[in-house]
Image (cartoon, coloured by chain):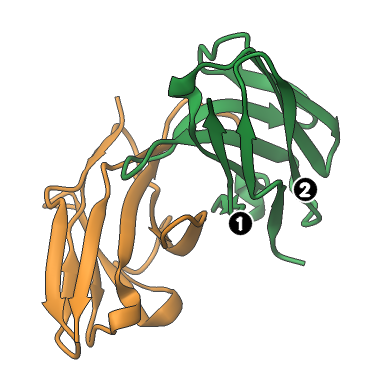
Amino acid sequence: DTEVTQTPKHLVMGMTNKKSLKCEQHMGHRAMYWYKQKAKKPPELMFVYSYEKLSINESVPSRFSPECPNSSLLNLHLHALQPEDSALYLCASSQEWTSGGNEQFFGPGTRLTVL
Amino acid sequence: AQSVAQPEDQVNVAEGNPLTVKCTYSVSGNPYLFWYVQYPNRGLQFLLKYITGDNLVKGSYGFEAEFNKSQTSFHLKKPSALVSDSALYFCAVRDTGWMDSSYKLIFGSGTRLLVRP
């Protein structure tokens, strides 16, 4: 299994809602990432988990709350979002650099619309 | 700081012709370079990478890239373009100062490739 899956594919939420995005990989990767991508722009790194511990938070607002329940799962909890948070949210994973894998594997993304 | 530049917002090429998508980089230390492709409303798909070794790197779907240290470039190429190659292409470099277990990718701004029939 060499893929990263993300659910849901699409999500529409109001500014007062609470929702969660889910990401899963079964490649044994110990690093998982959340990215935000606006249309026709490169992905922007939000969070990095390494061995199920949050290692990087790229100054993301607290209305985004990541969680890594186990080595295969990554969640992004959303609360009180703003319309400007509408974007494609991408999950990725990678193995240790010296293991030779090197590249990050990306999921298909969740298209989020905040009304 | 590490950076990559993709000087062309869009590249147009006729089907069957060779294509080149340009990328230049600025790094301290050894460059670790990647190309990804993104189709509409999809995630990024890995195409190829340069870590070390041969300057000509072969990747998926017939793509290749040439690492040129003197010109600090890593251009993506394909000998014969297909209409289905039309997509958004990102060049990326691994950022420095990261541990073995995870790392940050720094992306270029992206180049839209349009292959006309």
Q: In the rendered image of this protein, does residue A40 appear above or below residue A62?
A: below
Which residue in the structure is indicated by mark 2?
A: A24
Chain of the residue on which disc 2 is drawn: A
Which residue in the structure is indicated by mark 1?
A: A100
The residue drawn where x is 81% and y is 40% is A73
Q: Amino acid at mark 1?
A: Gly
Q: Position of residue A42 (x, y in %)?
A: 36, 40
Among the chains pictured, the one given orange colouring is B
Hey, which residue is sitting farthest top in the picture? A62
- Quarter of image, res A23: top right
Tags 1 and 2 in contact by the CB under 8 Å rule?
A: no
Q: Looking at this view, is A39 or A33 the one in front? A: A39
Q: In the rendered image of this protein, does residue A69 appear above or below residue A80?
A: below
C-alpha distance separating marks 1 and 2: 22 Å
**SS at mark 1?**
loop
Q: Looking at this view, is A35 or A29 the one in front? A: A35
